[in-house]
Image (cartoon, rainbow, N blue to C red):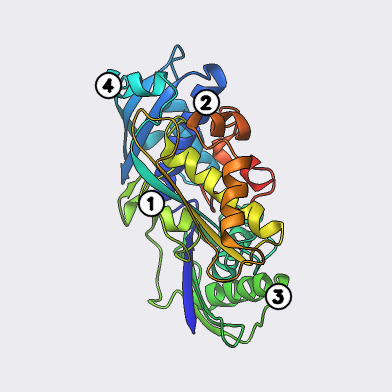
Amino acid sequence: MLFSSEQVSNGHPDKICDQISDAIVTDILAHDKASRIAAETAIKDFEITIMGEVTSHYEADYDKLARDVLRNIGLSDIEKYNIRLLISRQSPDIAMGVDRDGAGDQGMMFGYATNETSELLPIPYVLSTKALLRLREFNLKDGFKKFRPDAKSQVSYDYKAKRVDTFLLSTQHAEETQLDEVREIVSGIMKESANEMGLNTDFRILVNPTGRFVMGSSFADSGVTGRKIIADTYGGAAHHGGGAFSGKDPSKVDRSAAYMARKVARDIVKAGKAERCEVQLAYAIGVAEPVSVYIDCFGTEHMPAEEIWKEVMDKYDLTPKGIINTLKLRDVDYNLVSSYGHFGKPSLPWEQ
């Protein structure tokens, strides 16, 4: 039974946009915690558009924030980018509901946890992410001489045989870097990442299967905030409500409730009450309490499912205000989650 998950690097065009949007959220909240932010970013070639709604006493330096993100990723010719702003204030109709501590929108959010890794995340997703992080470390030490920032990885895992079947990684590289060298270095990174997790290393290896990958990031494709929501979460192993996280302040339940749903699922699995758990929360705009709370442990629970549900309802404040206060979401550095996943990082409050 093969299941595949993918991850993308911080140089992927969609992830460039997520990072710019979350840099804006973090900066504005650091100066005005009551701010309402919905920042979307689009990129193509050297053109960047930042758009959305921001209501705050603080005026962010959007141009500097965007260029700092580009520089941190390892992109070149930073000053050549043309950055355009299309920013207005939050709709008063939406603000009215949020001001009464209600949800900023209707919608459903999911959280998931599994005991198959120490991060309580699916094996193929964790391995895909670890490989790209290890590639990022190599690039930083190498000064991006051999490779460039854009990359994608994908792992196909056989849950019946408990082994990695196929490991695919494609990375942008310098014009002068030969394909043989790319494949030698990346194959080593893939095996090191699998070995670190105690997994087999005799998997099928695919590195840059089309061969040449010199043109990348926004010059090979366009990018938009919120287009890598599966790579942000569980690699497709769990449901997703459809709402993106990046660019949104925590009054948006797309973000805050997804983090709380993850925490609830994680707490259940970590406590040994189940081996796998998925939590769904659903909200109505302007209403504080969720309209539904659904928990599925897929038959792996070690206590009656009704008791797990009752404990959750008694233990957690699932209102937007309660979630924000419990997880201290106005104090989070969202730059930590804008690439390489929103979960599995120990410093995050919903991972504790």
Residue 184: x %, y % from top left: 59, 77
Per the image, the residue denoted by label 2 is 27
Decide which of 73, 28 is in the foreground and name it. Answer: 28
Q: CA distance from mark 1 to mark 3?
A: 34 Å
Query: Which circle's residue, 2 or 1, is located before the other in the chain?
Result: 2
Query: Which circle's residue, 4 or 1, is located before the other in the chain?
Result: 4
- Give the image quarter of residue 239: bottom left
Residue 218: x %, y % from top left: 35, 50
Q: Residue at x 67, y 61 (%)?
A: 273
Q: CA distance from mark 2 to mark 3?
A: 38 Å
Query: Which circle's residue, 2 or 4, is located before the other in the chain?
Result: 2
Q: CA distance from mark 4 to mark 3?
A: 53 Å
Q: CA distance from mark 2 to mark 1?
A: 27 Å
Per the image, the residue denoted by label 3 is 195
For numbered disc 4, what is the local secondary structure? helix
Residue 235 versus residue 351 in the image, above or below: below
Decide which of 190, 242 is in the foreground and name it. Answer: 242
Q: CA distance from mark 4 to mark 1?
A: 23 Å
For numbered disc 2, what is the local secondary structure? helix
Dot 3: few (<14), some (14–19), or many (≥20) neighbours within 10 Å? few
Q: Can you tell which mark lies on residue 93?
A: 4
- Give the image quarter of residue 51: top left
Dot 2: few (<14), some (14–19), or many (≥20) neighbours within 10 Å? many
